[in-house]
Image: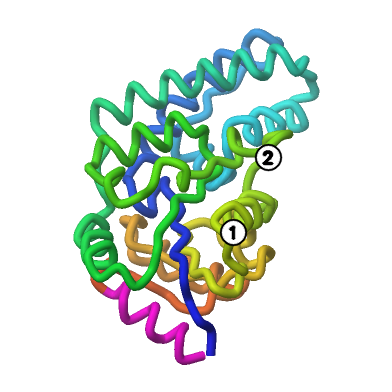
Amino acid sequence: MPQIKEILLDCDNTLVLSEDLAFEALAGLVNEINGKYNVKTDYTGPQLMTEFVGQNFRGVLKGMESKHGYTLSEDTREEYVKMEEDRVIAKIKEAGQPCVGANEALAKIYAEDKYKMAVVSSSALRRVQVSIEKVDQAKYFKPEHVYSAATSLNPPTSKPDPAIYLHAAKEIGVDPKQCIAVEDSKSGTLSAVRAGIWTIAYTGSYHDPSKAHEMAKTLMDLGAVVHMEHWDQFQDCIKKIEAM
């Protein structure tokens, strides 16, 4: 039976409903960038989300380069990363909302003080910080326990690479097997599972019931051990893992 000490939480569409906002901003920028390299595209946010959800913008850019046959210099890529970050943050500041029930679940865990909590995201640290501050969640996490694969690692990476989860566990001082991760995407789930962390598949941010059902099966097939449809099931999910 695992002795759980730490809860590691993805941010985008797990704690904060930010992915629709982010991919709306991202799609416009991707089309602009492709146009500069003589590639005419008309990507929409939902199209890009289907392909790249759970990855950061560096991953999206590398996907575009591979797909459309051009190469960005590292300096140019970093300029676009900063541009995307600014546009997405503006959207989140304007319209970001918590995932339904997330704030109540965090408040309960925080008050009981049985487990510590950290945020582990692929997104840039500034975006993650803005997101959790916008929805009044920052108070539940030590500032130094908010981790970003895009910012906290050198060189930066993105889920499904397990590096950010392994880094967070090492910095906190816990064994990965003493941690539970909550993830809503394929890349995030793979990242946590590859790091050896007990993973909850969260599907509460999927609006379409058939898509939620499909994603639940996908994430469980990838190695998640418990499925959570709503944050009010969170403590029951923890108990199930602790009984394994």
At a point 45% along the width and 33% down the height, the residue shown is 23
Instruction: Residue 144: give x, y in percent of width and height.
Output: 47, 42
Q: Earlier in the sequence, mark 1 or mark 2?
A: 2
For this rendering, which residue is in front, 141 or 90? 141
**Label 2 neighbour load within 10 Å: few <14, some 14-19, many 20+:** many
Q: Is residue 119 left or right of residue 205?
A: right
Above/below status of 82 relative to 99: above
CB atoms of marks 1 and 2 within 8 Å: no
Would you identify the image quadrant in which residue 106 lies?
bottom left
For this rendering, which residue is in front, 1 or 71? 1
Residue type of the residue flagged with mark 1: Ala
Label 1's element? helix
Above/below status of 153 relative to 88: below
Instruction: Residue 216: give x, y in percent of width and height.
Output: 47, 70
At a point 57% along the width and 65% down the height, the residue shown is 174
**Label 1 neighbour load within 10 Å: few <14, some 14-19, many 20+:** many
> Can you tell which mark lies on residue 169?
1
At a point 49% along the width and 26% down the height, the residue shown is 27
Please state the extent of the stretch shown in magenta in the rendering: 233-244
Q: Is residue 133 left or right of residue 161?
A: left
Residue type of the residue flagged with mark 2: Thr
At a point 31% along the width and 56% down the height, the residue shown is 207
Extreme residue in the front direction: 173
**Residue assigned mark 2:** 157
Of tags 1 and 2, the one toward the viewer is 1
Would you identify the image quadrant in which residue 182 lies?
bottom left
Would you identify the image quadrant in which residue 186 lies?
bottom right
Instruction: Inspect the magenta stretch and tell me whether residue 12 lies in it.
Output: no
Instruction: Residue 44: give x, y in percent of width and height.
Output: 47, 31
Q: Is residue 214 visible?
A: no
Above/below status of 46 relative to 140: above
Query: Separation of disc 1 and disc 2 at Cα?
Result: 16 Å
